[in-house]
Image (spheres, grey):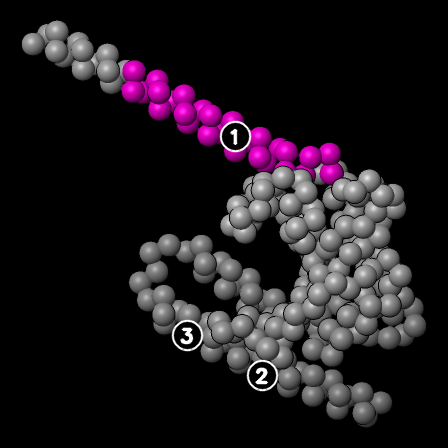
């Protein structure tokens, strides 16, 4: 009886060691993915983000200097985390490599321009089209063509020319950037909807989705009304 018990305990200990071994491998592999997905370009991406923020802030200030309404109310920028980028590559069946992160995925760098009024969005878009450092690759209009859940925003994929070596070795190099242009109302709704995605054990998900869609439509109506008020004020002046 004791022999059997000792044998079982030894087997159990061996099993724990094996599981721990594989768990360690998984943790190490995950850490390697997070460290290696951007490779030597990790600091470059941060530098590009900072440079783009400065350029966009300068464009905004230029409007103020000419007594024009500012292009946007505030600016939010980020470099996609290595973990999120690795997950995206896996989801799209891309190799989890630096090439995939920089050349096949186009949102390693992301900038969101949050505007006061709907009419400010075309003004921002015009500035991007006119910038000699920015080449527009793709545009998606989710404002006039909202997503089924109510999401509204204007997305732009661009290649920006920056004084850094790119993946192909060119310097100045070209790097993909995603710009999102939206109003304050659109941004508030998107933040709330994003938070709801990560709430677990929601008892009435269909009702929540329906209410979020209704709120999105109401906020869109408010955006139009606010724009109308702005036009009326401008006409009086």
Q: Is residue 56 left or right of residue 65?
A: left
Residue found at the very far top of the displayed protein: 3
Residue 126 sits above or below residue 228 on the image:
above
Is residue 199 in view from this perspective? yes
User: SS class of the residue under badge 2?
Assistant: helix
Q: Secondary structure at mark 1?
A: helix
Q: Which x, y percent locates residue 216?
A: 52, 75
Residue 108 tag number: none
Q: Is residue 21 magenta?
A: yes
| Mark 1 crowd level (few <14, some 14–19, many ≥20, 10 Å Cα) | few
Quarter placement of the C terminus: bottom right
Query: Which comes before the other along the chain, label 1 or label 2?
Result: 1
Kindly identify which residue carries mark 1. 29
Q: Position of residue 7 (x, y in %)?
A: 18, 11
Give how far apart the Cα atoms at labels 1 and 2 are. Answer: 49 Å
- In the rendered image of this protein, does residue 65 appear above or below residue 38? below
Q: Position of residue 58 (x, y in %)?
A: 86, 60
- Could you say which disc has been placed on residue 221 in the image? 2
**In the rendering, which numbered label is found on residue 210?**
3
Label 3 crowding class (10 Å Cα cut-off): few <14, some 14-19, many 20+? few
Q: Quadrant of residue 158?
A: bottom right
Magenta segment boundaries in residue numbering: 14-41
Q: Give x and y (percent) for residue 116.
A: 71, 73
Residue for point 73% across, 34% down: 40
Distance from the alpha carbon under mark 2 to that under mark 3? 17 Å
Q: Earlier in the sequence, mark 1 or mark 3?
A: 1
Q: Residue at 47% of width from left, 78% of height from top?
A: 214
Farthest residue to the left: give it.
1
State how far apart marks 1 and 3 are (Cα): 41 Å
The residue depicted at 83 percent of the width and 47 percent of the height is: 173
The local crowd at label 2, few if under 14, some if 14 to 19, many if 20 or more residues have their Cα within 10 Å, is: few
């Amino acid at each position: 009886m004791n022999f059997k018990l000792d044998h079982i305990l030894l087997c159990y200990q061996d099993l724990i060691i094996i599981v721990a071994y594989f768990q360690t491998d998984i943790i190490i592999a995950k850490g390697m993915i997070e460290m290696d997905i951007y490779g030597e370009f990790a600091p470059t991406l941060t530098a590009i983000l900072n440079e783009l923020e400065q350029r966009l802030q300068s464009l905004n200030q230029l409007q103020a200097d000419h007594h024009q309404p500012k292009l946007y109310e505030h600016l939010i920028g980020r470099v996609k985390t290595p973990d999120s980028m690795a997950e995206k590559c896996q989801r799209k069946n891309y190799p989890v490599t630096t090439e995939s992160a920089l050349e096949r995925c186009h949102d390693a760098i992301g900038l969101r321009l949050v505007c006061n009024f709907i009419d400010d969005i075309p003004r921002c878009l015009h500035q991007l089209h006119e910038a000699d450092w920015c080449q527009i690759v793709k545009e998606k209009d989710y404002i006039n063509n909202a997503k089924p859940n109510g999401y509204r925003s204007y997305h732009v994929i661009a290649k920006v020319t920056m004084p850094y070596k790119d993946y192909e070795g060119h310097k100045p190099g070209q790097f993909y950037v995603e710009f999102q242009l939206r109003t304050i109302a659109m941004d508030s709704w998107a933040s709330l909807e994003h938070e709801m995605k990560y709430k677990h054990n929601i008892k009435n998900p269909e009702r929540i989705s329906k209410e979020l869609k209704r709120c999105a439509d109401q906020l869109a109506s408010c955006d139009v009304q606010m724009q109308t008020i702005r036009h009326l004020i401008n006409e009086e002046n």
